[in-house]
Image (tube, grey):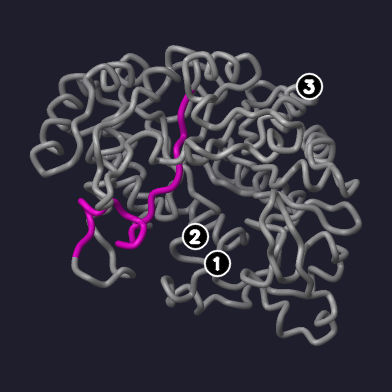
Amino acid sequence: MGNEKAQRAQGAQESRAEGALGRRTLLGAAVLSAGAAAFAAPGVAAAADRDSGGHHSGKGYKSLPVPTIVAHRGASGYRPEHTLGSYQLALDMGAHVIEAGDIVPTKDGHLVCRHEPEIGGTTDVSAHPEFAGRKTTKVIDGVSTTGWFTEDFTLAELKTLRAEERIPGTRQHNTLYDGRWEIPTFEEVLTWRAAQSKKRGREVWIHVETKHPTYFRKLGLGLEERLAKLLRAHRLDKKDSPAFLQSFEPTSIQRLNKLVANPLVVLLSTAGSRPADFVDIGDPRTVADLITPKGLKEIAAYAQGIGPTLDLIIPKDAAGKLKEPTTLVNDAHRAGLILHPYTMRNENTFLPADFRKGTDPNAYGDAFGAFQAYFATGIDGIFTDNCDTGLLAREDFLNG
């Protein structure tokens, strides 16, 4: 009931003309006076040009509210991530898009939703003596990891496991739900999405990421073809289909661009990092090269958006405080790309130093202030573990 009331209020508020540029410029100044970074006026103006009462005009992803609140792995601030319980809570909270799938394969070729193929930290597999012998060490994208891996299990075996909280030291309250949900298959997510869309009378949007696609392709478990087949079966493979497809590997997005017509997003890690596929094929470029005007123009030839880490939007100094924004928002918009950066969380340990409160790293800081700082740069949306906080912060931002 409370959620419905909040959504009605938000909808009414969004339908009013906001005078977005003036309000956002004033908001940028207010945040500045509170000790945040300086926010460039051109970025604010660019957002205002695209935003009419908090909405894009057009079909498909251009119809989504701006800034878009993307529920990172569902409502992962409150439930174990990548479970149907986490996705459902995020949808009930009012998130505009649900990241319902970091997809990884099983031994028998099914796609399941886990943040990483290693599942020792997100399931109860270590408590299953029948799988003790499956524990091993693998090198994935140059990183040695010890644990249990989805590609060593059949789907039937994975379905005997239960999901657990990934960071219990930070989110102890989430451990209450350990063991409650299975690992969902991506097909189960698509069935859930369709049912929720019918129930709500509107299309439920999802974000889907291919995880370590080069690594899995070398194992004979290519992700893109399997993903495209499921999307086609569920009639979600069109230009205006409510499903973003994303990857940290540009070649995965290029491959998907040939298989489906969905809106595509290239994820971008730290500036000095190299995408795993670039390392594999000997491409010397780093993320810093991809976020130049030239690099962004190249991405725009096969994708509709980028998902940069927040530090590429506003860097931090040595003390962890926000500096001035980069030109990435404006540069991406000039290339015709939208930006959905990641990830905003409420806990002090994840917030810029400007917005931390007290000394407990697991306590909530001034997440609302941090959201305003990022919104004021003109981003089109943001990934957050706490979509309820993000939605309220968005409302504050649009109200000015």
Mark before the other along the chain sequence, 2 or 3: 2
Q: How many marks?
A: 3
- Is the N terminus in the top left, top right, bottom left or bottom right quadrant? bottom left
Tag 3 residue: 258
Q: Nearer the viewer, residue 360 or 274?
A: 274
Is 352 contained in the magenta span?
Answer: yes
Tag 2 residue: 76
Marks 2/1: CA distance?
6 Å
**Which amino acid, mark 3?**
Lys
355 displayed left or right of 137: left
324 w.r.t. 189: above or below:
above
214 displayed left or right of 24: right
Q: How many other residues sit within 10 Å of disc 3, few (<14), some (14-19) or many (≥20)? A: few
187 w.r.t. 14: above or below:
below
Tag 1 residue: 80
What's the residue at 69%, 51% (across, down)? 142
What's the residue at 43%, 12% (across, down)? 334
Q: Tag 1's secondary structure? A: loop
The magenta segment is 338-357
Is 284 contained in the magenta span?
Answer: no
Q: Position of residue 38 (x, y in %)?
A: 18, 31
